[in-house]
Image (tube, coloured by chain):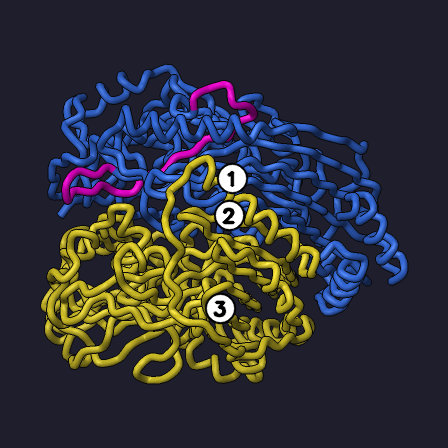
Amino acid sequence: MLNDILKTKKSLFSDDVQTVLRGQENRNRRVVFLQGNLVGNVRSETRGVSARVFKNGVYGFSSMAEYSKSAADAVLKAATENAKFLDSHAPKGLPAQVSFGTGIVPVHREIIDFDQKRIIETCKALDDYIVRTYPDLTSRTVVYTEDSQDKILYTSDAYDGHITNPRCYIYVMMTALSKADNAPLELFEVFGGSGSFESHFKTIDWMYPAIDRLHKKLMDKVDGVYAEAGYKTVILGGELSGMLAHEAVGHTVEADLVLGGSVAGPNLDKRVASDLVTMIDYANTTPTGEAPLPVYLDDEGQIAKDAVLIKDGILKGYMHNRESAEKFGVEPTGNARAWDFSDEPLIRMRNTAVLPGTSTLEEMIASIDDGYYLIDTNNGQADLTGEFMFGVTMGYEIKKGKLGRAILDTTVTGIAFDMLKTVDMVSDKVNWNSSGFCGKKQRMPVGLGGPELRCKIMIGGR
Amino acid sequence: MKSIRKIAERIEAGFASKGIKKYSYHIVEKETRELSAENGEFSLLRTLFDNNVVLSAFKSGKNGIVSGNDMSDAGIDALVSSAVLSAEAAVKDPAHDIAPEQEAAKFRQGCLKPDFDRFFERVKELLSDIKAEYPKIQIMNVISKYVKAHSLLRNSNGVDFEANAGHYEVVIEFAGHEGDKTTSLEYTGVMMKDLEQRIIDMGSMRYHLDNAQKQLDQISLSGKFTGSVIFTPELFAEFLMMVVGNYISDAVLIDGTSLWKKKIGKKVADEKLTFTIKSSDRRLVEGERYTADGFRTEDLPIIEKGVLKNFKIGLYASKKIKKPVSKNSSMDFVVKPGKSSLQEMIASVKKGLIVGGFSGGQPGASGEFSGVAKNSYYVEDGQIKGAVSELMINGNLGSALQDIRAISSEVLADGAMVVPYALVDNIVISGK
């Protein structure tokens, strides 16, 4: 954990500007077993200090790859000079930003380090289980990945604090050959979440049932068929509805993208979904407990609050940093986050989810005469118009209310605010995923979740 | 900040004190000055001083890799200790190795003495050019930066490569905007050695700005058909990256899932395709000079007249699968232009699309791809009928290379690659 060496530097903040000074260490651990070969065995730490200075509507920023008092002096000076340069060359003449309180937010979680040897032995044991149990695989990969952020924040007119974001995961990937054309087919499962190695991987046998289910799904896929391309009635599994919340809706309601012309701009307080759909970007606490990747304080020193995005189908609000909140005349939601010490904070999602409904999955499957149940995804993208694309790696046909054959990899697409209006059943359970990164200029860990949704969507295929 | 050679001495003394005789390391010191504009107005100026060192240590045939950015003596010593511990924890594998001795070399590339005031004026000029010439364009972000890097790669076999490189780069993100109508987000960028030219005239800036305005008025297309697709150079490069990842890179060759694992010397594409990773090409601003493994970079022919010439693999994979190591670890793509002009290509399309972007995931090992065609136009009987959206394209990477019907004589040279348009048949196109 970082020692606080920045506290005394608040006295260097200039009176005529608004300043945030941040010290930060990012830590990564990575172990990769590919077909039993240890092909990745990497540990990394980067640390440094940065300063951001706001003056008359423009920002100056500077960072240095050194966590020291002298580096703090240097970045404060350079950031102030940069703000002055921009203010003189491209003046905006705006007033200082409104303060929403000051104080101190303490650290919520510890970051604990573990020996690489222990991580390697754990991955090897898991690999041994897979090779022992499933001789029918073409290939297998076990990946341990850990990233943590440790930040100390001092601000001129917001909250100071110590922020920690540890998380770690084990990915299990399996490949087998399709019966139809001998083409390799892949599936993966992820284990872990917020916290350190010991909190998730003290033992490994608890993962075996999920690995068995992964293998079963892969074997179903080996016999799989191509989906029929077209506009279909489908059930989006929780992973896909979480992806929908993040990619297709979430990005369009980030206030910087609203200002950039996203489709959400003209739709505030209008119907954008069926009344079964409510969507929230949770800061740190969901109705069932702590969010997968809790955020208590953002990197501008704002207390993180939930952002209600869609309520009963009506678009209700956006996610904000200080600057956008001021432009929209609302309070900031604490969504300004930076990935590395050298990154400036941007408006980023935290734990974005569609809220559960009242249907059961079984009822939803039984209600479809001809469609698909889409379960796993490996990526998703969307743009300002809300047009989205999700890769689907696992799914089944639904015929006459029953699950049919597995389908091969495909893609679904639609326009979010059109597609959400077709949602007519929502399941009663939320499935969260927190292992991915969002890639808006910088990487950022994000949580996304959702229940199963019955809707109409374009599906790709042969 | 200590000199890069002093850091190197400290690393080697640290390895010597721990009895490590086999190692390699790479040190990079980087300085960035970045100017951002948001919604058409300058908003942020950043100055970043960054550095990074990656150490690879070998002990008893086991390899560990660590990286960090603390260049103090204590920081380097801690990193060396961590590398040794990491190696001790590893599994013995003789395929882990370092590059053999080669002649030491120093490289200088690009612009090492930037003119930031002039750069600021060029970016200002770009903003005003867009405003004047493309009134329906809403600029979301302009990120313009000058980046200078000093790097050193050394290993215990005597490899010593030192490089100094600097360049300017500008990336713009924008959309067409008129009333409540917004187009898909578009972005394009250029890398530059100097500031001689107006930025709007470089790379494919004008193509994309013009495209975003045209995309405001769309025609709808429904149903499913098999047609032809003209890939823009940026998208064609994206597909070639997928081809590299799916068929000829380390992981898929080590685990044996590559469908091209036995295809060296065999025809994998139409004979019109000649594709080289050509770091020596003068149109590239910062071509690679040494590889991540410590080999002096050489040009790497991938496909010549449709025939697969080489895999693109690092030292570990080369020893694992017993094939020659690729002396190029870059994505410096250069594709040989063809004989047809873009206009001739369009005129030859019976029914199909011009596609400027693809929203889809990395295809699985089978090469099947399926995704949304972005920034696209419908073409029928050789005529562009209008801009379209909500269309999917589906196909297979390997088959698509075999189905190349034409490569354009025009190329995009944006400082990072040199790639033409490609016309590909037998792509499944489906609308609502």
Which mark's residue is nearer the viewer, 2 or 3?
A: 2
Could you say which is closer to the camera, residue A186 or residue A94? Answer: A94
Number of marks in the image? 3
Camera-side residue: B14 or A373? B14
Q: Residues within 10 Å of mark 3 (few under 14, many from 20)?
A: many
Give, as a three-letter code, the residue at label 1. Answer: Phe
The residue where tag 1 is placed is A85
Q: Residues within 10 Å of mark 2 (few under 14, many from 20)?
A: many
Q: Amino acid at mark 3?
A: Val
Q: Position of residue A75 (x, y in %)?
A: 61, 52
User: Which residue is at a point 29% across and 46% down the rendered structure image?
Assistant: A260
Residue tagged 2: A60
Q: CA distance from mark 1 to mark 2?
A: 8 Å
- Which chain identifier belongs to the blue chain? B
Chain letter corresponding to the colour yellow: A
Mark closer to the chain start, 2 or 3: 2
Q: Amino acid at mark 2?
A: Gly
Q: Taking the image as drawn, is residue B206 in sight?
A: yes
Q: Quadrant of residue B238?
A: top left
Answer with left or right where residue B34 lies relative to residue B420.
Answer: right
Tell me the magenta residue range.
B176-198
Across and down, in percent, residue B178 comes to: 17, 38
Contact, mark 1 vs mark 3 (Cβ under 8 Å): no
Secondary element under disc 1, as helix, strand or loop, is helix
Q: Mark 1 to mark 3: distance in Å?
A: 51 Å
Q: CA distance from mark 2 to mark 3?
A: 43 Å
The reply to whether dot 1 and dot 2 touch (C-beta < 8 Å) is yes
Residue under the point 31% across and 31% down? B208
Q: To which residue does mark 3 refer?
A: A172
